[in-house]
């Protein structure tokens, strides 16, 4: 009996000692947290998409509260969230144009010649390991097995007839699809840019005509007729400079391959 009482007493004393040690340690090592950090975190969209460039919403909220990040980087929340965060921080949100994903490839299964019949895992990287750069004769083409679709948290990426396409109404510009594409095809472009070249093939025109019915052949007709000098052929493929493009649409009309598109809203 005495042994049991002694054990209980010893445990009680040890508990009290450890409790005092923890209490002192909590005061000594206590880190003050800026209350604005929690408020900013609450205002964010909560997608943890990483589009802000920080490790999730917690990381971004901490950076904002510390004055190390601007208030308008929450791409999932957009302008409304930027305004809330700016109000919490007592600053101006600043203007920034929304970015959206774009896939510069029009090589659908019915227009792009297949290189081989791939029957492996539905994964673009696996297909590249299996057969090289592409499952199509165009080595610049979208593989179309949906790595970008799996990475998108907002249902903005879809595979349509063998190539990836972005739904601009749902895209928040987080860049997850850009990171997921093993061929680095997916781009982020300004939302206001409505006219883009749907090809990135850098082969010469004669070769392109053999492997794709709609690929850019670098004929330069768009370059010669652009009234604002916004489109140039570089490495045998047309490229548009958004800073110069007035979006008149003339290039879409003169392109003999119909590869320059007016993007849907």
Image: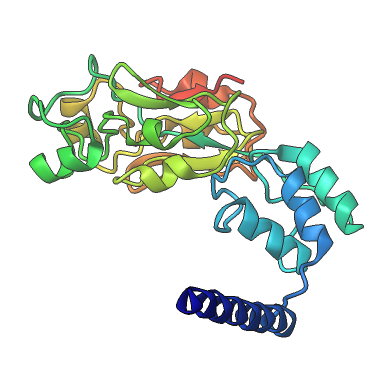
x then y, percent, for residue 196: 50, 32
x then y, percent, for residue 183: 30, 45
Left or right: 169 with respect to 43? left
Q: Residue at x 71, y 38 (%)?
A: 78
Q: Is residue 230 visible?
A: no
Q: Residue at x 33, y 31 (%)?
A: 216
Quarter of the image for residue 242 reads: top right
Q: Residue at x 52, y 80 (%)?
A: 6
Task: Name the foreground residue: 161 vs 48.
Answer: 48
Task: Name the foreground residue: 92 vs 195.
Answer: 92
Q: Residue at x 56, y 31 (%)?
A: 171
Residue, far front: 1
- Look at the picture and state if 111 lies above or below 179: above
- Look at the picture and state if 104 lies above or below 188: above
x then y, percent, for residue 83: 84, 44
x then y, percent, for residue 51: 57, 48
Image quarter (top left, top right, bottom left or bottom right) of the C terminus: top right
Q: Is residue 245 visible?
A: yes
Quarter of the image for residue 142 reads: top left
Quarter of the image for residue 59 reads: bottom right
Protein image colouring: rainbow
Task: Name the foreground residue: 22 vs 15.
Answer: 15
Count of numbered circles on the image? 0
């Amino acid at each position: 009996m005495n042994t049991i009482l002694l054990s209980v007493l010893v445990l009680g004393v040890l508990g009290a000692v450890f409790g005092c040690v923890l209490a002192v340690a909590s005061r000594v090592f206590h880190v003050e947290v800026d209350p604005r950090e929690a408020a900013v975190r609450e205002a964010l969209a909560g997608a943890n998409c990483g589009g802000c460039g920080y490790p999730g919403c917690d990381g971004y909220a901490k950076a904002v509260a510390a004055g190390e990040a601007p208030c308008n980087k929450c791409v999932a929340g957009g302008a409304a969230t930027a305004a809330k965060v700016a109000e919490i921080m007592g600053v101006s949100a600043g203007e920034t144009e929304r970015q959206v994903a774009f896939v510069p490839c029009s090589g659908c299964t019915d227009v792009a010649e297949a290189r081989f019949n791939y029957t492996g895992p539905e994964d673009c990287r696996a297909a590249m390991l299996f057969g090289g750069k592409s499952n199509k004769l165009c080595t610049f083409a979208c593989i179309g097995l949906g790595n970008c679709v799996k990475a998108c948290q907002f249902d903005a990426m879809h595979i349509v007839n063998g190539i990836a396409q972005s739904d601009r109404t749902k895209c928040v510009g987080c860049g997850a699809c850009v990171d997921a594409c093993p061929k680095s095809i997916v781009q982020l472009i300004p939302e206001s840019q409505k006219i883009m070249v749907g090809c990135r093939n850098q082969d010469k025109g004669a070769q392109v005509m053999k492997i794709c019915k709609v690929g850019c052949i670098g004929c330069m007709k768009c370059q010669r007729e652009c009234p604002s000098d916004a489109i140039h052929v570089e490495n045998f493929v047309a490229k548009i400079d958004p800073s110069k493009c007035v979006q008149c649409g003339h290039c879409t009309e003169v392109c003999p391959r119909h590869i320059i598109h007016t993007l849907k809203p």
